[in-house]
Every structure is written in structure tokens, then in C-alpha cells.
Image (tube, grey):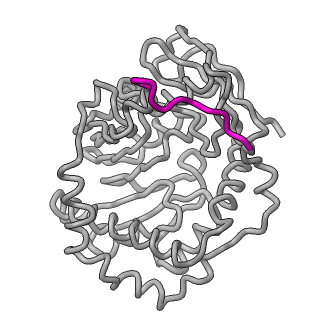
Amino acid sequence: MEKFLEIQSSCPICHSRDLTTNLELRYWRENVLHFSDCAQCRATFANPMPSDELISQGNTALVRYYQKDKDFTQEFREARQAYLKGKILARRLRRWKKKGKFLEIGCYQGFFALGVKDHCDWEVETLEIAAPLAQFIRGSLGIPCHQGTLETVPLEKKYDFVACYDLIEHINRPRDFLVNLAKILNEGGRVEILTPNTIQDFAFNRRAYAAGWPPTIVLNHIMNFSPQALELALKQVGLKIHRWHCFGVRHVLKDFGFFGMGKPTPVKNNPSMQEFMVLPENSLLEQWTPQKIQELRTHPKVSWGYALLKEILPKLFRLRVPARLGIGHEIYCLAEK
């Protein structure tokens, strides 16, 4: 198996050759990743990128890693939270357009998309790489689900709104992904993106590596955007930012190590990909009976009152930092074609 793609001599976003490779992380215990920083757009990316096969193995191990001690009570709670967030987005979509076509890329179990589908008149579809999840979404939730990636699945429709949450940082060919993303949008269509801000998100990793303790990651965050890099990448494929900001500044002093906070320390027993790949899959999908799905839809904690207290009001008062300042763990971006 080829573990890595070719080494890049230029930035995959701005094509600058002014790169510095001075950061090393481990992708699980077995795989060393070298990261290049672009001096022009401030993107940080694995160089060379992991191959599709290595990412697939890592994702398989990650599923088993998360499922190891998980029970259906936790599964139901996470699905309920996703459903409620979909319900809230449906409200926004109704205010924007009465009807349209919606696509969620990387939808996991599909409960977010189900929340959208149940609470607006939009056509809802999903795209998911894992075959068991795609089958569950189609069979149990009744939502059309394309199995594969944006690069491998020929989507015949165009969409008015695409949800792309915590996804683009996992893409090893970001240019191809964004070109295809722009192609599936209608004119005036929008894409909503959430992705870590590499300026703050990678700050601790840099300090840990400098201290001689390269961290081990199990999430394949291999294409890390700064706000500048994201803006440029979207502009190159014909998408204009409609609204954006950064958030998640709670640990900014600790992340950047100000006043001696967040001092890196050695981490023992780093997780191994092979150890988790051989574990049996703890599939909880079989426990999602029609009765459980209906219970989720009618649960008190997916009501509008609960949404107001736990989701809507907290977000209204959440500190939003101008994206160009580069402070905040996450970048929120709404772009339009």
C-alpha cells in the first residue's frame, strides 16, 4: 500500500513556493507526518499528503476508537443534538427560500440532515463515504444518500445550499474538492463551512514539537486553513464570502502559551492504528428501530424551547472575532456562488 502522495513543492492553495517544513506530528503511532507552512497564505498542510488508502485505514480505526466504550444512551444523545441543529438550520433555510435543494457532505449517520428534512420543504440529500452509514441513511431515515466522495460520485443535480462541516481539513486534494464543490452549486447557491483555524488550532502542536514531544493525532487534519487561505481558496473557484468569523477563543492564552500556560508535556501510550483496526466493530446502527427514530423526533430536548435555551441564545452571545485577526479555534464561513 502506498501510504503517501507525492511531495509538494508549492502550496496547494496559493501555489507559493515559499514553504517551510518544520513541524512533525504522528498520525496514529505508526505514521509520521511532516507539515509545511506557507508564508504567503499561512496554510499548513501535510507534505507529503497521506494517500486515500491510509486515510481510509485511519478512519476505520477512528470509528472503532470512538465506539470502544460507547453505548446507545450516548449514541441517542449525540443523534438528538445533531437532529436539533438540523432543525435550527431548516428554520434559516425557510427564511431564505421557501424551497430549494440541500446537500450535506460527510453526513455521518444523517440525523442532522433528518432534522433539516423534517422541518422545511427543501429537497434533502446527503453524501457519505462509509457504505454502512449510507445504507442506514437511505433505508432507515429515508434520505437519498450518495455513497463515496465529491471527487468520485457524479452528482447530476445542482444544489442551493451545501453543508460542509469539519470536512475540508481532511481532504488530501483540496483543489479538486473545491472545484467540484463549486460545480454542484446553483448560481446564487451557498455553502456553509466550519473548519479549524490553523493559526490557533496548530499553536499547541508547534510548541509541543519544539519541546521535543511531537503530538499524536487520530483525526486526519491534513489540510489546515488560515482565514486568508480559506478566502483565497474559495475565490479561486468562483465563490465569494457572504459572512465569516472565527470563534472559540476560550483557550487562546493556553493554546499560544502566553504567561507560561499550556506547557507541553510528554504523552504516553499513544494510540496505534493497528490496535484499533483489529477490534470488532461496535455497531449501534442496528438499535435504531423505527420506534427509536420516532422517539428522537418527539423528544422534549428537540423542542423549540430547548433549542432557544441551549443552542440559539448561546450562539447569539458567542464571541465572534473578525476572521482576519486569525484568533479562534474555528472558522465559520458562508460563501455564495
Does residue 61 lie above or below 208 as drawn? below
Query: Going 34% across and 40% down the picture, which residue do you hit?
Result: 250
Query: Going 44% across and 32% down the picture, which residue do you hit?
Result: 255
Of 285 and 183, nearer the camera is 285
Q: Where is the C terminus found, in terms of image quarters?
A: top left
Residue 21 spot, x, y in % from top left? 62, 15
Q: Give the overall secondary structure of the magenta segment.
A: loop
Q: Which residue, as the protein is rendered here, is positioned at the far bottom? A: 291
Q: Which residue, as the protein is rendered here, is positioned at the far front? A: 260
Residue 80 spot, x, y in % from top left? 40, 73
Residues in magenta, as a range: 257-268
Judge left or right: residue 336 versus residue 166.
left
Quarter of the image for residue 98 reads bottom left
Quarter of the image for residue 212 reads top right
Judge left or right: residue 316 versus residue 82.
left
Query: Going 31% across and 48% down the picture, which residue do you hit?
Result: 186
Residue 152 spot, x, y in % from top left? 60, 48
Q: Where is the N terminus found, in terms of image quarters?
A: top right
Total labels drawn:
0
Query: Going 42% across and 30% down the picture, which residue do you hit?
Result: 200
Q: Which residue, as the protein is rendered here, is positioned at the far top? A: 18
Of 9 and 222, nearer the camera is 222
Query: Does the magenta run of residues contain 63?
Result: no
Does residue 99 lie above or below 32 as drawn? below
Does residue 275 lie above or below 177 as drawn? below
